[in-house]
Image: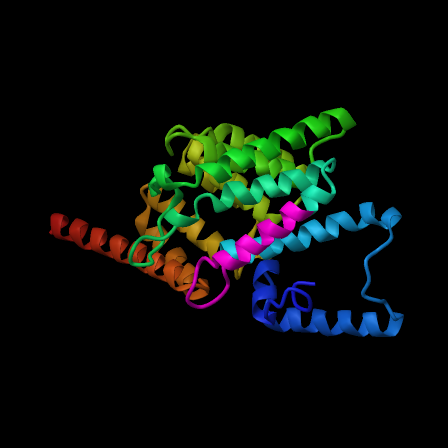
Amino acid sequence: TLRTVLGLSVAETAHVFLVSEQTMQKRLVRTRAKIRSANIPYRVPPPHLLPERTAGVLAVLYLLFTEGYSSGSGSDLIRPALADEAIRLTRLVAQLMPHQPEVLALLALELFQHSRAATRLDAAGDLVLLEDQDRSLWNSDAIIEGSRMLTAAEKTLHLLGAGPGPFLLQAQIAAEHATAPTAAATNFARIATLYARLSQVAPSPIVDLNRAIAVAFSEGPDAGLALLDTLTLDAHLGEYHVLHATRADLLRRAGRPADALPHYRRALELAPSGPERRYLQSRIDDVLASARVDEARRS
């Protein structure tokens, strides 16, 4: 659907699935062959099949938003038109299925995340970390609507007597970031707990990586590094630049810049966008400059 209906390139589709372009091309060829051989028609499913199709629709919308929020292109980190289209489509699904908590939760998640769009890059187009963003410039209307959607999702879930789904848990995590008055006031302990629950509901190496980051902010970088070491994420995310950047940043925060340097360099090799590459290069430059200062002091 991402490739054929929404028009993402093979490279973009591969990026949101964290696989190589060659792997994605093979998957697309196999999928098209299956559709042809099984004579699967493109049509709106009848009402009784909608519930079983909803999860697939939400996954597509989430991945479309992901590509808009953090692009795999070589120059742009953010593609607002894609994110806006994902939100528009998700809002439409929410209007058609207002009693589906995961639909409401996905809309809340997208609104919380997209509320920061104006502050994620500076005037020069360089990356601004979440902790350094000007929260007064965040889109308060999007945060208010996201909070309203999340509350509706939680109430609907309670009425159904069901446990939280993956989008509801992610929306709760995003709400903690979006509603914290300052970076220091963010409840990272709760975020880490929510990621732990999410890893049980929807196991994923990305979830585990984000849990380690939350643990690092709530308990210290050494605790985050210890968790990273127990998760063996390299087997799944070895080509994912964020894993290497995370390890590097935690090592730097733990006072081990020399150990951080090779991980920053590996992240730089893998980073897909210009703003991310420039940010990582600045980190490398900072580490090298600090090493030169230390060497001068010792001599």
Q: Which residue is found at the position 74% from the left and 48% from the top?
A: 55
Tell me, yes or no, whether the highlighted magenta stretch contains residue 16.
no
Quarter residue 67 falls in: bottom right
**Image spot of residue 162 (x, y percent):** 76, 29
| Nearer-the-camera pick, 116 or 194 | 116
Q: Is residue 44 above or below residue 7?
A: above
| Nearer-the-camera pick, 207 or 36 | 36
**Image spot of residue 153 (x, y percent):** 66, 32
Q: Could one spot residue 161 in this view of the protein?
A: no
- In the picture, measured across the screen, residue 79 lies left or right of residue 30, that is left
Quarter residue 123 falls in: bottom left
**Image spot of residue 172 (x, y percent):** 57, 33
Tell me, yes or no, whether the highlighted magenta stretch contains residue 80.
yes
Q: How many marks?
A: 0
**In the image, which residues are magenta?**
71-92
Which quadrant, please, contains the N terminus? Answer: bottom right
Q: Is residue 292 above or below residue 229?
A: below
Q: Could one spot residue 69 in this view of the protein?
A: yes
Q: Which residue is found at the position 57% from the left and 69% from the top?
A: 11
Q: Which residue is found at the position 36% from the left and 41% from the top?
A: 137
